[in-house]
Amino acid sequence: SPDSISKVVLNRGLDVGTAFEILSIDIADVDVGENIGAKLQESQAEADKNVAQAKAEMRRAAAVAQEQEMKARVEEMQAKVVEAEAQVPLALAEAFRTGNLGVMDYYRLNNIKADTDMRDSISKGDESK
């Protein structure tokens, strides 16, 4: 306020050692200047925010890319499983031809497969509940 400015100037004795004496101070208008420090802090905060946003976007893009890579690997692995499953009947036929697999072994193998299919269907039934 203008009164506090006048009191500070008069109390400090700014006229000491001069040929003048300060009798009073008239302050008609006070213009508040720009706070350069605050503007610099604001600019720095904005720059820091932009850098953080850019880094976050980079991390997000990397995560999306990694997710796509994993989906591609899953597809690749599923294709390998299908390929391997297609080889099973051929291997069974070859085992029959060479005598490495008998009829009872074949029936035992089918029984195990039926048990496995039954367990799979039971476990899928539990997931839906």
Image: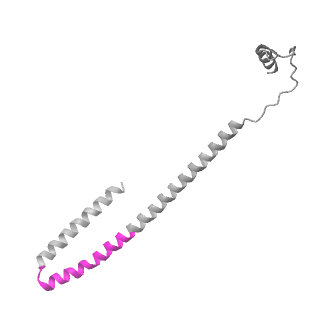
Magenta highlight on residue 72: no
Count the marks: 0
Q: How is the image coloured?
A: one colour
**Residue range highlighted in magenta:** 75-102
What is the quadrant of the C terminus in the image?
Answer: bottom left
Place of residue 71 in the rendered image (x, y in percent of width and height, measured from the top left): 42, 65
On screen, residue 26 versus residue 34, left or right, reads right
Q: Main secondary structure of the magenta part?
A: helix
Relative to 63, say whether 109 is above or below.
Answer: below
Relative to 117, say whether 20 is above or below.
Answer: above
What is the quadrant of the N terminus in the image?
Answer: top right
Q: Residue at x 39, y 67 (%)?
A: 73
On screen, residue 55 versus residue 101, left or right, reads right
Q: Residue at x 41, y 64 (%)?
A: 70
Q: Nearer the viewer, residue 128 or 52?
A: 52
Q: Residue at x 32, y 59 (%)?
A: 125
Q: Nearer the viewer, residue 4 or 11?
A: 11
Place of residue 20 in the rendered image (x, y in percent of width and height, measured from the top left): 87, 16
Place of residue 84 in the rendered image (x, y in percent of width and height, measured from the top left): 28, 75
Q: Quadrant of residue 22?
A: top right
Q: Nearer the viewer, residue 20 or 22?
A: 20
For this orientation, the residue located farthest to the bottom is 97
Place of residue 35 in the rendered image (x, y in percent of width and height, measured from the top left): 72, 35
Relative to 103, say whether 46 is above or below.
Answer: above
On screen, residue 126 versus residue 60, left or right, reads left
Q: Quadrant of residue 101?
A: bottom left
